[in-house]
Image (spheres, helix red, strand yellow):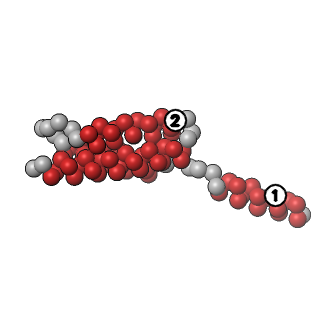
Amino acid sequence: MGAKLTALILVVFLGSGCARAPVQEMSDARQALDAAEAAAVGGEPPEELVQGRELLHGAEESLDRGEYEQARELALEARRAAVTARESSLAEY
């Protein structure tokens, strides 16, 4: 009985460390990029917006490959770039 309990604890412990898909981070990045794009209407998009879109694309590719931690990091970077782009666009007005 002790070996089964140890094995079960090990499975639960190892399973809890598995990375999950960064659904929320991807969604946050997309929403931030959409807001930055809306703020940039009528002018040339800020470099950060272009960079953010590229980062999000990389995050989507990482997600497709199952590289969840990489996708999470890229999505967070994309969101940061989008926030900066939006602030830049709004400061111009």
- What's the amino acid at mark 1? Ala
Q: Position of residue 56 (x, y in %)?
A: 39, 40
Q: Mark 2 sits on what residue?
A: 64
Residue 18 in view of the camera: yes
Vertical placement of 72 versus 58: above or below?
Answer: below
Left or right: 75, with 84 as reference point: right
Task: State how far apart marks 2 and 1 are (Cα).
Answer: 32 Å
- What's the amino acid at mark 2? Asp
Residue at (68% x, 54% y) in the render: 15
Residue at (82% x, 62% y) in the render: 6
Dot 2: what SS? helix
Label 1 packing within 10 angstroms: few (<14), some (14-19), many (20+): few
Dot 1: what SS? helix
How many tags in the picture?
2
Left or right: 29, with 21 as reference point: left
Give the residue furthest to the front.
47
Q: Mark 1 sits on what residue?
A: 7
Q: Position of residue 11 (x, y in %)?
A: 74, 55
Residue at (39% x, 40% y) in the render: 55
Residue at (51% x, 39% y) in the render: 63
